[in-house]
Amino acid sequence: MDETWEGLRRAAIEVAQRAYAPYSGFPVGAAALVDDGRVVVGCNVENAGYGVTLCAECGLVSSLVAGGGGRLTRFVCVNGDDDVIMPCGRCRQLLWEHGGAELLVWTPTGVLTMDQVLPQAFGPEALER
């Protein structure tokens, strides 16, 4: 992995330490590079009403939009043991919307494109048909 990937992983590890995960005990941190050079991060925020829990990826995408938008170009998420993990299914859809097929995702088996992580994805172009 190059220095950019390692920097993203370090940012994800750091933000995972701020996760609010009292119910699952499974903190998650996420970091991504934006096409303008910014790095955005997010951590999971659990809730006693489990259905309103926010995944780390949700926080990251919210930060992206609140910070002016842009396209995600690289993404990684980690657990509380600093292991690289896969984004959940719901969040794969969020990542597709804001990074597209070419978004690079560091997975436990290496770097994959978002198209490989979420094949035949549903995106904005499907609504235009």
Image (spheres, rainbow, N blue to C red):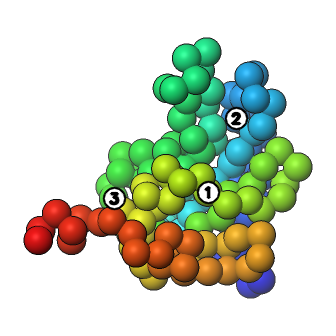
**Disc 1 vs disc 2: which is toward the camera?**
1
**What is the CA distance from the residue labelled 1 to the residue labelled 2?**
15 Å
Q: Name the residue under label 3.
A: 69
Residue 43 placement, left or right of 128: right
Secondary element type, mark 1: loop
Q: Is residue 64 visible?
A: yes
Q: In this view, does 4 lie above or below 12?
A: below
Residue 73 drawn above or below residue 51: below
Q: Where residue 96 sits in the image (x, y, percent)?
A: 42, 66
| Three-letter amino acid code at the position of disc 1 | Pro
Left or right? Give the position of 36 relative to 85. Answer: left
Task: Note whether residue 41 is visible.
Answer: no
From mark 3 to mark 1, how far is it between C-alphas? 20 Å
Q: Which mark is residue 19?
A: 2
Residue at screen point 51% across, 26% down: 51
Q: Residue furthest front?
A: 120
Crowd around label 3: few <14 · some 14–19 · many ≥20 (10 Å): some
Which numbered disc covers residue 13?
none
The amino acid at mark 2 is: Ala
Label 2 CA crowd tier, 10 Å (few <14, some 14–19, many 20+): many
**Considering only order in the chain, which callout, 1 or 3, is on the residue closer to the N terminus?**
3
* Residue identifier under label 1: 87
- Residue 28 lies, in percent from the top left, at 71, 45
**Mark 1, residues whose alpha carbon is within 10 Å: few (<14), some, or many (≥20)?**
many
Marks 3 and 2 sit apart, C-alpha to C-alpha, by 23 Å
SS of the residue under disc 3: loop
**Residue type at numbered disc 3:** Gly
Left or right: where does residue 68 sit relative to residue 119? left
Residue 33 screen position, x and y as percent: 54, 68
